[in-house]
Amino acid sequence: MIEDSGLSRSNLLTIEDDVDFVGTVIDDIWRMSWPGEQGSDEYVAFFKSLPSEKRLIWATWRLQGEVDNGGFGQYFTNIEDDCYVEEALAGFTTLGATEHRQMLQQVIEYREEHADEIAKAREWDDYVKIMGVVPLNEALDNVTFRFINRNPELYALRRKYIMGHLDVFAPRP
């Protein structure tokens, strides 16, 4: 069962910085009682039971966080059994983050083109030769850095979206 948000509009609307604003919403989603291990059937079912607005924010944030921390290769290993990729693509479309969506789509296509090599990579060192930051950047025109450099835009777009759906993210006055 999804618990109610602990956020109030009055508190959320006092936050001026986009990163802090979105981070407060993310923290509220993070505090929910996520069942099971990440990627488990229960975990995925819980994610899918969230309102679509929260799934959009969560999926695009998970992608951004993983890319910021270790690149797209890390994202795909850490969410392998989750359901975030399609949600992130749809989320970028809804947010109007066209370039973010295009970059993710480029990486998905690259990953599909190298699926056999990835499947044969038994060790992390072998995997990063294909999906690491350096090979992806060389193959896809610095895709990781282009994505990270657009983070401020992504936070602003999320903030705008959240403001349009305050009843979902901060239902209390």
Image (cartoon, rainbow, N blue to C red):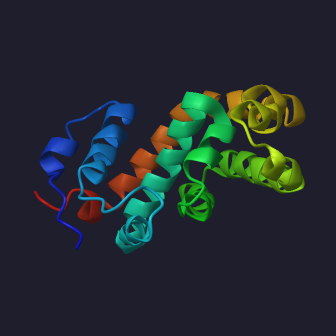
**Whole-percent x and y of residue 33?**
23, 59
Judge whether 130 appears above or below 96 on screen. above
Query: In the image, is 78 to the left or to the right of 129?
Result: left
Of residues 32 and 153, the one nearer the viewer is 32
Q: Quadrant of residue 138?
A: top right
Q: Quadrant of residue 50?
A: bottom left
Of residues 34 and 146, the one nearer the viewer is 34
Residue occupying image coordinates x 30% and y 62%: 35
Residue occupying image coordinates x 29% and y 32%: 16
Residue occupying image coordinates x 64% and y 48%: 76
**Whole-percent x and y of residue 121?**
79, 43
Judge whether 37 appears above or below 44 on screen. above
Q: Quadrant of residue 91?
A: bottom right
Q: Quadrant of the C terminus?
A: bottom left
Q: Quadrant of the N terminus?
A: bottom left
**Whole-percent x and y of residue 81?**
56, 60
Query: In the image, is 117 to the left or to the right of 32?
Result: right
Residue occupying image coordinates x 55% and y 46%: 78
Query: In the image, is 21 to the left or to the right of 1?
Result: right
Farthest-out residue, left:
173
Query: In the image, is 69 to the left or to the right of 54?
Result: right
Judge whether 170 appears above or below 136 on screen. below
How many marks on residues? 0
Of residues 141 and 96, the one nearer the viewer is 141
**Whole-percent x and y of residue 8?**
14, 52
Of residues 75 and 10, the one nearer the viewer is 75
